[in-house]
Amino acid sequence: MAADRQIDETIRRALDEDVGPGDVTTTAAVPATARASAQAVAKQDLIVAGADVAARVFTLVDDSLRVAIKIPDGSSGTRGDVILSVTGPARSILIAERVALNFLMHLSGVATLTRAFVDAVAGTAARIIDTRKTTPGLRGLEKRAIRAGGGHNHRYALYDGVLIKDNHIRAVGSISTAVRAVKAGVHHLLKVEVEVTGLDELDEAVAAGADAVLLDNMTLPDMAEAAKRYGDRIVLEASGNVSLATVRQIAETGVHLISVGALTHSAPAADVSLRFLD
């Protein structure tokens, strides 16, 4: 599958960066005949994401390694839980260790933060979605981690969804002009979303034929008014300065989507370590 090939390419780039021509410490210290078993252990409560990616790191380094995933993506783990185990040549495990953990820790961090936002809006109609504020080269994996955490994906990239932002509007002069140009120039199945900063701009976007509107840094009263006016007609997305402290209030205004850039650009890595067994 194309996705699997892309993941392998991403892993190989990471291994090339970290291992390069070889691990001088492991090669010098550990006999080639040495065998070992190790476990990736959670050191905090978390939502697992990237377990399969970490497993693939080990088998790309050495296909004789045997990896067993104990907690699959999207499942919760607690401090002390074993996420995966690996058995085989000790050198290979040591060479793969850091890259495997980097993927597992980062992606589980994204999923864990996403789940916190999802839990914060539970009982409302709002969905938590991601943005394009992703780590270069890791967008596909990070968007998978968002889903593992219970969130939803916004457009993947510039080519699969229309979002007319403030600079597009400045470039052509008005929201109406931008919407007309886009509707005349893109495939008819593509939905058109417009970023607005106030109710007047919202009215203009809806009148111009927008299918969805991004409410950028609008106040809670204005978001509630937007939902009152148009919530049953178009999709309303709230964005800007969204935090765990504010997301519930935003959801209760009646918006349909809440986009959170922090899910990918600021998620702290989950704490996971690889423990060799005696």
Image (spheres, rainbow, N blue to C red):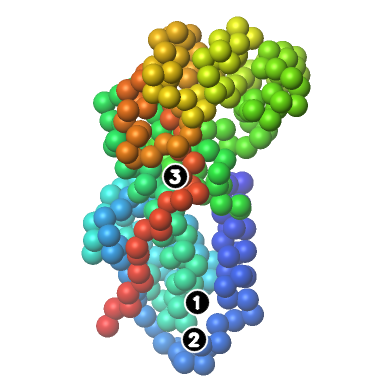
Mark 2, residue position: 26
Three-letter amino acid code at disc 1?
A: Ile
Q: Is residue 196 above or below residue 264?
A: above
CA distance for labels 1 and 3: 30 Å
The answer, for residue 19, to whether it is visible in the render is yes
Q: Nearer the viewer, residue 84 or 227?
A: 227
On residue 44, the disc is: none
Q: Secondary structure at mark 1?
A: helix
Q: Earlier in the sequence, mark 2 or mark 3?
A: 2
Residue 18 falls in image quadrant: bottom right
Front residue of this view, candidates 132 and 176: 176
Mark 2 and mark 3 residues within 8 Å of each other at the beta carbon? no
Secondary structure, mark 3, is helix
Q: Is residue 84 above or below residue 241?
A: below
Up-down: is 220 above or below 274? Answer: above
The residue that appears at 55% across and 44% down in the rendered structure is 133
Query: What residue lies at 29% left-to-right and 35% top-to-bottom?
Result: 120
Question: Mark 3 highlights which residue?
Answer: 263
- Which residue lies at the image location 35% right of the left edge and 49% below the top edge? 112
Locate residue 91, reporting x and y percent.
47, 82
Return the mark for residue 95: 1
